[in-house]
Amino acid sequence: MSLIKEKGYKYTVIHGSMPMEERELAEKIFESKDTNIMVATDAAGEGINLQFCHIMVNYDLPWNPNRIDQRNFNN
């Protein structure tokens, strides 16, 4: 994320330590176009609707192919 910040991009973050309210707020900020990058752990794979995303880059894919499908189809 330091490179994203260094380049001046605005971004939001979702991770497992965040309460659901904060995750939902990050989703709303991302959807409002105030940011154009979201960095997220698997925590974004459940309960967050990112179907409006145009591009998704998966990093550190899970071993289980069902988790990959869930990650991509929910988002």
Image (tube, rainbow, N blue to C red):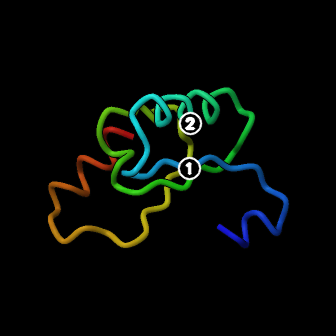
Question: Which disc number belongs to residue 73?
Answer: none
Q: Is residue 1 left or right of residue 16?
A: right
Badge 1, how many Cα within 10 Å: few under 14, some, many 20+? some
Q: Earlier in the sequence, mark 2 or mark 1?
A: 1
Could you tell me which secondary element the residue under label 1 belongs to? strand
> Which secondary structure, mark 2?
helix
- Type of residue at label 1? Val
- Residue 12 at x, y percent in the picture: 62, 46
* Image-based side of 51 in relation to 39, left or right: left
Query: Relative to 27, is 6 on the left or the right?
Result: right
Tell me which corner region of the image, top left, top right, bottom left or bottom right, holds residue 51.
top left
Residue 26 numbered mark, or none: 2
Q: Which residue is drawn at the image coordinates 54% and 39% (left, top)?
A: 53
Q: Say whether marks 2 and 1 touch (CB < 8 Å).
A: yes
Q: Quadrant of the C terminus?
A: top left
x and y percentages locating residue 38 in the rendered image: 58, 49
Q: Residues within 10 Å of mark 2 (few under 14, many from 20)?
A: some
Indicate which disc residue 13 carries: 1
